[in-house]
C-alpha cells in the first residue's frame, strides 16, 4: 500500500503557514479574517497551542493587524471588513491572555493594552464587547498594569464603565477594581466617589455584573471598618440583605463571592453579622462549595479558614455542624489538587486551634485525621507551631502507643513530618512530649514500618545546626546505641537507609560526634560483631549505597581526627571499596564515592596503604 513521503524539514508547518498568512501584506482582508478565526479556534482552552503560537510570534502579528484595522476604521475606509477584523483580533488577544501569564506578557509587550482601551468608546457595540472581554482576561493576571484611582480622569473613566449598559463593560470596571484596589486610601477614594452604591445596584443585574460587583465590593471593604460602616449605612439601603440573599444563588461562584463579602464584614467588626443563623449558613455553604470541581472548590476552604480563624464562636458552630468529620471525609474521598488540599488542611488547623473538644474529635478519627496532619505539618511552618501549641504532639504520642500498627505508623509518620525543617525551639517543644525512651521503643517496634518512620523522625531531629546532633546523645547515648543495634539486626532495607542517614547527619557534627558514629559502624576490638558498612556499600539497593557513602563523606572531611578515621577505614577495606564505586551505575553514589575518596587521599599515601 503506497504511503506519502514526509514533508522536507524546511517545509512550513500548518502553524507557521497560519502566521505567514497573518503577516503577509499580500493576504486580503477576507483571508486574514478567516485566519484570525482559525487561530482563535485553535488556542481557546488549549495551553499547549497557546505556547506554541507564542513562540511563533503570533501575538505581535495579531496586534499589528488590530492596530492597522483600527487606523483604517478611524479613516472610514473598508468598514465592511475592518470592524470584523477588529472584533476577531480582540478576541484572539483575549484568548492568549486567558489563564496564561506568558500570554498576558506577550499581549502587553506588543502594545495591545492601549488599543483595547481605546476601543471601549467605539460606536460598534460588538467591537466594544470584544475589547471589554479581552481586557477582563488581562486583568485576571497579576501582570496587568495597576490602575490609578487617584487620578481624576481615571476615576471618571471607571465610573463611565460602571454606568455602561453593556454587561462586559461593567464587568471590566469590576475587574479593574478587584485587580488594583489594595490600599485604604484607594478603598476610601472609591467609596467617596459613589462606587459602592453603583456596585450594589449592579448586584441585581446579569450574572457577569453580579459576580464582578461582589468581587470588587470585597476588594473595597476588605479590612476597612470605615468603608464597611458606609456600606452598611442607610444610604445604601438594604445592601447586606441583597448580599445575604446571593449566598443562595444557583451559581457556585456567586455564592462563594457573596460569602467572601460577608466574611470581610465579619472580620472587620464583630458588631456585624451576630445572627447565629447567618453564621451557620456561611459555614455550611462554604463547606458545600468544596465539592465544586473547578476554581470555586479550590477557593472555598480558604474562605472557610478565613471565616473561623481565631474565632471560638464560629469554631463552635462549625463543630456543631459536624464540619470536622465532614472535612476529614473529604480527605478520604480521593485525590484533590494541591491548592484544595492545602485549603482543607488550613481550615482543619484553624478549626482545632482553640477548642479542646474540636482537637479531640479530630484526633479520634485516627487514620483520616493522621493522614491530614501528616500532610499539613510537612509544608506549612506556621501551622506546625499552632499544632504543637494546641496539644497536638501529646495526642500523636498517645496514638503512637496504639495496639493497631496502622495507627502507630501514621502517628509516627505525622511526628516525622512535624519535625521536618523546624527550628530548635519547636524541636524542644516536641521532645517535651516525645522522650528518648519513647523514641527508642518506636525504633525497636515489632512493625518494620514503624521502625522506618521512627528513624526518619530521628533523622529530621538531628538535621540542622550542630546543636541538633546532641539530641541523640541524651541519657548517655541510649538513643544512638539503639540506632546502631537496629543497623546490625534489621533486614528491611528502608529501615537501614533511614538509620544510615541518621548516622550521616550525626557525622556532620564535631569530633566527638564523628567518633561516636565510628564506634557504631566499627565494633571494638575483640567483639564478634562484623562491620556492617561493607555490606551496605555492596548492597543492590542504590538508596542504601547512597546513604552509606554520605556518611563516609562526612567522616572523611578534613578535621583534627580525620587522619585516624581514614586509617581505620583503610584497614577495614572501606577505602578499597570506595575505589570500586567510582564507576557505580548510580550517579549519586558515583559522585559521593569520588568525594569521599578524594578527601581520604588528602592524608597522603601512608594512610592509603
Image: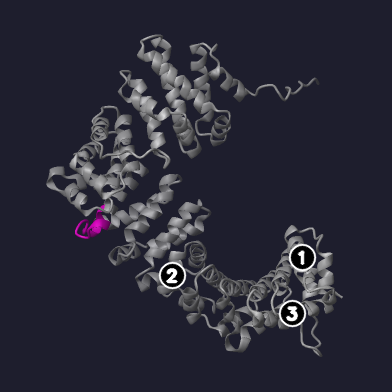
For the residue pair 242 and 387, the one nearer the viewer reads as: 387
Residue lying at 60% horizontally and 81% vertically, measured from the top left: 472
Residue positioned 80% across, 73% down in the render: 535
Task: Describe the element under mark 2 as helix, strand or loop.
Answer: helix
Whether residues under marks 3 and 2 lie with C-beta atoms below 8 angstroms apart, the answer is no
Q: Image height check: is 34 above or below 165?
A: above
Residue 81 in view in this figure: yes
Kindly state the secondary structure of the residue where label 3 is placed.
helix
Residue 273 located within the stretch drawn in magenta: yes
Q: Is residue 181 above or below residue 207?
A: below
Distance CA(mark 1)–CA(mark 3): 18 Å
Depth check, front residue: 187 or 4: 187
Tell me if label 2 and label 1 are in contact, CB under 8 Å.
Answer: no
Does 283 sit above or below residue 29? below
Question: Is residue 445 visible to the viewer in this orientation of the structure?
Answer: no
Q: Earlier in the sequence, mark 3 or mark 2?
A: 2
Residue 534: x %, y % from top left: 80, 74
Residue plotted at (30% across, 46% down): 219
- Write down the region rendered in magenta: 265-277
Q: Which residue is mark 1?
A: 593
Residue under numbered circle 2 = 385
Residue for badge 3: 521
Was residue 78 drawn as part of the magenta stretch in this picture?
no
Is label 1 in a helix, a strand or a loop?
A: helix
Mark 3 → mark 2, Cα distance in angstroms: 36 Å
Between the C-alphas of marks 2 and 1, the distance is 39 Å
Q: Position of residue 379 (x, y in %)?
A: 50, 61
Name the residue located 38 percent from the left edge and 30 percent from the top edge. 133
- Residue 29 drawn at (x, y percent): 48, 12
Amino acid at each position: 500500500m503506497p504511503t506519502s513521503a514526509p514533508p522536507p524539514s524546511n517545509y512550513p508547518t500548518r502553524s507557521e503557514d497560519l502566521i505567514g498568512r497573518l503577516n503577509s501584506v499580500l493576504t486580503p482582508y477576507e483571508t486574514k479574517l478567516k485566519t484570525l478565526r482559525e487561530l482563535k479556534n485553535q488556542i481557546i482552552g488549549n495551553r499547549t497551542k497557546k505556547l506554541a503560537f507564542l513562540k511563533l510570534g503570533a501575538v505581535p502579528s495579531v496586534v499589528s493587524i488590530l492596530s492597522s484595522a483600527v487606523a483604517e476604521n478611524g479613516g472610514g475606509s473598508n468598514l465592511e471588513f475592518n470592524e470584523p477584523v477588529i472584533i476577531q483580533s480582540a478576541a484572539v488577544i483575549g484568548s492568549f491572555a486567558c489563564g496564561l501569564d506568558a500570554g498576558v506578557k506577550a499581549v502587553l509587550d506588543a502594545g495591545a493594552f492601549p488599543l483595547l482601551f481605546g476601543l471601549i468608546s467605539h460606536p460598534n457595540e460588538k467591537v466594544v464587547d470584544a475589547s471589554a472581554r479581552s481586557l477582563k482576561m488581562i486583568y485576571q493576571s497579576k501582570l496587568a498594569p495597576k490602575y490609578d484611582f487617584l487620578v481624576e480622569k481615571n476615576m471618571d473613566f471607571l465610573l463611565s464603565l460602571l454606568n455602561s449598559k453593556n454587561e462586559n463593560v461593567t464587568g471590566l470596571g469590576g475587574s479593574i477594581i478587584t485587580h488594583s484596589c489594595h490600599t485604604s486610601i484607594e478603598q476610601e477614594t472609591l467609596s467617596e466617589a459613589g462606587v459602592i452604591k453603583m456596585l450594589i445596584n449592579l448586584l441585581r443585574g446579569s450574572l457577569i455584573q453580579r459576580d464582578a460587583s461582589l468581587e470588587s465590593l470585597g476588594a473595597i471593604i476588605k479590612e476597612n471598618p470605615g468603608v464597611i460602616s458606609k456600606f452598611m449605612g442607610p444610604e445604601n439601603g438594604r445592601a447586606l440583605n441583597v448580599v445575604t440573599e446571593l449566598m443562595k444563588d444557583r451559581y457556585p461562584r456567586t455564592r462563594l463571592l457573596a460569602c467572601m463579602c460577608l466574611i470581610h464584614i465579619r472580620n472587620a467588626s464583630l458588631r456585624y453579622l451576630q445572627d447565629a443563623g447567618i453564621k451557620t449558613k456561611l459555614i455550611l455553604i462554604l463547606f458545600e462549595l468544596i465539592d465544586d470541581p473547578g476554581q470555586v472548590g479550590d477557593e472555598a476552604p480558604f474562605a472557610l479558614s478565613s471565616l473561623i480563624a481565631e474565632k471560638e464562636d464560629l469554631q463552635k458552630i462549625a463543630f456543631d455542624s459536624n464540619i470536622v468529620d465532614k472535612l476529614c471525609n473529604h480527605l478520604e474521598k480521593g485525590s484533590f489538587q494541591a491548592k484544595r488540599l492545602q485549603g482543607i488542611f488550613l481550615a482543619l488547623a484553624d478549626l482545632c486551634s482553640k477548642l479542646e473538644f474540636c482537637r479531640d474529635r479530630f484526633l479520634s478519627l485516627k487514620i483520616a485525621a493522621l493522614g491530614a496532619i501528616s500532610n499539613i505539618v510537612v509544608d506549612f511552618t506556621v501551622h506546625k507551631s499552632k499544632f504543637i501549641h494546641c496539644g497536638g504532639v501529646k495526642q500523636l504520642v498517645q496514638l503512637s502507643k496504639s495496639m493497631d500498627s496502622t495507627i502507630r505508623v501514621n502517628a509516627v509518620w505525622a511526628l516525622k513530618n512535624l519535625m521536618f525543617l523546624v527550628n530548635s525551639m519547636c524541636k524542644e517543644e516536641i521532645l517535651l512530649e516525645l522522650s528518648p525512651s519513647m523514641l527508642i521503643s518506636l525504633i525497636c517496634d515489632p512493625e518494620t514500618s514503624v521502625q522506618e518512620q521512627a528513624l526518619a523522625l530521628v533523622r529530621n531531629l538531628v538535621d540542622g545546626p550542630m546543636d541538633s546532633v546532641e539530641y541523640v546523645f541524651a541519657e548517655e547515648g541510649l538513643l544512638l546505641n539503639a540506632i546502631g543495634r537496629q543497623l546490625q539486626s534489621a533486614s528491611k532495607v528502608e529501615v537501614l537507609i533511614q538509620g544510615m542517614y541518621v548516622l550521616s547527619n550525626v557525622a556532620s557534627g564535631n569530633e566527638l560526634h564523628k567518633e561516636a558514629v565510628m564506634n557504631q559502624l566499627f565494633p571494638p576490638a575483640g567483639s564478634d560483631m562484623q562491620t556492617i558498612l561493607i555490606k551496605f556499600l555492596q548492597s543492590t539497593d542504590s538508596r542504601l549505597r547512597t546513604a552509606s557513602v554520605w556518611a563516609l563523606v562526612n567522616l572523611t572531611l578534613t578535621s583534627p581526627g580525620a587522619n585516624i578515621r581514614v586509617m581505620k577505614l583503610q584497614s577495614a577495606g572501606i577505602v578499597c571499596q570506595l575505589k570500586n564505586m567510582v564507576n557505580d551505575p548510580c550517579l549519586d553514589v558515583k559522585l559521593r564515592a569520588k568525594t569521599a575518596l578524594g578527601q581520604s587521599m588528602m592524608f597522603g599515601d601512608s594512610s592509603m596503604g
